[in-house]
Image (cartoon, helix red, strand yellow):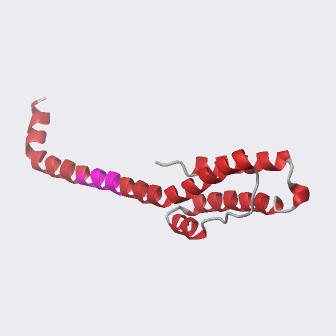
Amino acid sequence: MNDLIKILQLYSPLISLLTFFLGLYIGNKHAIGRDKRQEFNERAEPIIDYFDYMQSWFEQRGFTTAFLLPEFAITRLMRRLSKRKQKRFDALIRQYQSTFNQLKHEKSRTEEAYTLLLKQLADIKQFLRLK
């Protein structure tokens, strides 16, 4: 027991310095993570607002081709996503755009197509949920 106390006394300044730098490192990592979440939220909000509006529009009034995707906001958001998330988000947007384009034709305007479009909107909004 006395040996342990002597070792701790001898290395006390080194242990203090080591734990101090470990605390700085962990704190910095948490701050960086918080900043990334804030940047994501700032870029995702306009897109979420767009899809919220589109979902309520489709549910209340049916399909229209008057609304285009906010390409600039999507591009800004894509820059902040990891490669894996970029691929997932791009796939969701492409699916939505494909269904949207199919609904431009009168023959394709079925209840199933509307349901699919609303499901894709919900999937995109789930992906974009604020952190």
Q: Which of the two residues, 33 or 2, is positioned nearer the viewer here?
A: 33
90 with respect to 80 (left or right): right
Residue at 14% x, 35% y: name it. 4
Q: Residue at x 34, y 54 (%)?
A: 29
**Image quadrant containing the N terminus:** top left
The image quarter in which residue 38 lies = bottom left
Instruction: Please provide percent x and percent y for residue 6.
Output: 8, 38
Percent position of residue 36, x then y: 41, 58
Q: Is residue 6 left or right of residue 25?
A: left
Camera-side residue: 21 or 77? 77
Of 68 and 98, nearer the camera is 68
Majority secondary structure of magenta residues: helix
Identity of the residue drawn at 86% across and 62% down: 105
Image spot of residue 35 (x, y percent): 37, 57
Residue 112: % across, % down: 84, 46
Q: Which residue occupies the extreme top position in the image?
A: 1
- Left or right position of 88 against 17: right
The extreme right residue here reads 107
Residue 31 part of the magenta-drawn span: yes
What range is drawn magenta here? 24-32
- Between residue 56 and residue 7, name the one nearer to us: 56
